[in-house]
Image (cartoon, rainbow, N blue to C red):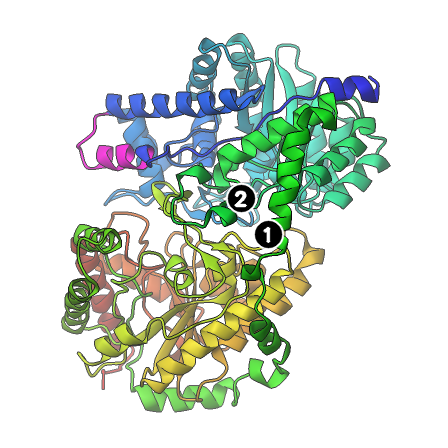
Amino acid sequence: MTSTSAAAAARATVHGYPRQGRNRELKKAVEGYWKGRVTAGALHRTAAELRRENWRQLAEAGVHEVPTGDFSYYDHVLDTSVMVGAVPARHRAAVAADALDGYFAMARGTQDVAPLEMTKWFDTNYHYLVPELGPDTVFTTHSAKQVTELKEALALGLAARPVVLGPVTYLLLAKPAPGAAPGFAPLTLLDRLLPVYAEVLADLRAAGAAWVQLDEPALVQDRTPAELNAVARAYRELGGLTDRPKLLVASYFDRLGEALPVLAKAPVEGLALDFTRSAAANLDDLAAVGGLPGKRLVAGVVDGRNVWTNDLEKSLATLGTLLGLAGRVDVAPSCSLLHVPLDVTAERDIDPQVLRWLAFARQKAHEVVTLAKGLAHGTGAIAAELAANRADLASRRGSALTRDPAVRARAAAVTDAATHRSQPYAERAAAQRAHLGLPLLPVTTIGSFPQTTGLRTARADLRAGRIGSAAYEELVEAEIREVVSFQEKAGLDVLVHGEAERNDMVQYFAEQLTGYLATRHGWVQSYGTRYVRPPVLAGDVFRPGPMTVRWTRYARSLTRRPVKGMLTGPVTMLAWSFVRDDQPLADTARQVALALRDEVHDLEAAGTPVIQVDEPALRETLPLRAADRPAYVAWATEAFRLATSGVRPDTQIHTHMCYAEFGDVLAAIDALDADVISLEAARSHMQVAAELAAAGYPREVGPGVYDIHSPRVPAVAEVTDLLRTALTAVPADRLWVNPDCGLKTRTWPEVRAALDHLVQAARTLREELGHRAP
């Protein structure tokens, strides 16, 4: 096919779309089902309507081929486990009794059965349920969900492409099931899994699928020769099937690299590549393999993970280059639009001038359609859109919001001494123990306590002007009193104020810093029914005044026990925001770190003996390619130390991380130089404690013993056993007792029972170790 005909064939498509609905209807329906207020039938009807609405929006925008199968009640990786019959033994009875309840049991657990482990989806803030596979895993085909959703779209008269997680990525994301022999690798199950994928493809073909997309994002990471051989074998076998649709193998989040020649040679009809991240590398690699003659290339030129309006002329230039490298070039976002909010037009509080700089999912769909039109018919066909786009980009570049000379001068003046504590850890630890007087195995929490309906209602009433700030603050103080009182009675050793005043651990701070914009309706799925509103980081960052001191000081006035000050770290402030793309991330991180340094100083001056600066996103933001990691680790750890190093030796600095593969960042964790780190460990059975011990980590550690993403309350014996496991790796004088993460999503009855069990377990072990509390 010539370049001209390739351009004429250009079509617009997307890899996936936000699931929740304009008003988070899915969240409300699912949580209503959990509480018994919504029937299974009503839940299914709500889901079907949301799918129809998504397809309607895409079709009205001009998208030529809509995705199906990307919708999920909880998580698409869990959906894949169901599709291939990979249900852990402990959940099989529940799934057999009721498929929907069994599905949610795998995701959330029950009082008697633990859920699947949960971790981050590559370098995003989306969480997936980790498949558990073992040598005895038997795969079976269950394609009803994928077939049903395809038929729904086809019945509406739409061209539809089912999207399915690819077999290699599925196995690479999996973990060995409990009891699997050491060294077992789930990828060894590939030959057992491929026949199930063949049956799924045949079922989708029979249902009317012309194309099926198999997502293989794991291939943008560094892969071994054995793993690449598995890729070649998988797609040789799937591509060689006679009863199948055409296959589009999709990658995203980075360059495809050494997997590109493998897939280019495979008997598949198309590839999807990300041309927003490492665009030059993907272009060069594509040219190096001789392009994709006769094949379809879906070019991801619109950023599916950030909210800035696309530079249409730049994207058209990239698309023009690609025309000579494939038989057909289609236009798409770089990845699923699951990672951005739904519609920017719902925002009423952002300056209209600034709104012109932003594009959420609906706007990105229009950008894709515009680019496909321009590629197919020339720039004259989109002259008006190009002119408006140039004006929007110029408006942002010239705005005073984006640059503050004083902030930039302060960041440029940072010295190396500002990023290091005044004394080494061993000396600090002695001073802190004398200052705090804590028992062995001190019990604490990560920070937040349940956010009750009353609190959320009061916050909404404050925004709407139905109550004044004085009335709101009285409610917050009452909540803090209850939280502190409960912790004292329960016997916790280091208390928190509970964060009653906070809407979100990033948004709360963003709303008090310059350079950030907050949205009202910018919801993005984090996991299950948990949605967040990432703020937009549009300009230089400065802290006009204290953000947390008032509430921490109030909590301290209620108790003689140590109270932690709670902050969100600079890397997480970036990772869980939509960051600016007009300067290096390292520069933005330094600005945020300086703002937090001011807050840390004020907390210490107010008498706060323990200050926790959470960095759960440190692993999440780690580049997917090893070659890109050293530079990231250098600026990320420097930013944390810049925020925390200005305190006295006897002020104890904590940090917290959760739901990630910590083994990948052990050196970075050490480089933070925090005095205490708390980490998720309950679902992973204390794996992180052993990893830290093997790495020789020298500081204090609180591996979590209460999975706060499940409604189940761990028994005292279970917590005690987890702590005994931790003690095999961490000395007792360096071990803390705490939940995996904050408690805001749990109910008060669950929290009271669980924390009582943590305290009882700690006391049992102290007695066994011959230690009495001071």
Instruction: Please tell me which residue lies in front, 330 or 360.
Output: 360
The image shows residue 707, relative to residue 527, as above or below, that is: below
Q: Which mark is residue 356?
A: 2
Q: Name the kind of residue labelled 1 in the image.
A: Arg
Mark 1 crowdedness (10 Å alpha carbons): few <14, some 14-19, many ≥20: some
Does label 1 or label 2 sit earlier along the sequence? 2
Q: Is residue 634 left or right of residue 467?
A: right
Q: Which mark is residue 562?
A: none
Query: Can residue 191 be seen by looking at this rendering?
Result: no
Marks 1/2: CA–CA distance = 9 Å
Disc 1 vs disc 2: Cβ atoms closer than 8 Å? Answer: yes
The image shows residue 204, relative to residue 133, as above or below, that is: above
Residue 153 in percent (x, y) is at 46, 15
Query: Can residue 39 be seen by looking at this rendering?
Result: yes
Q: Is residue 352 left or right of residue 234?
A: left
Q: Which residues are magenta?
A: 26-39
Residue 446 placement: quadrant = bottom left
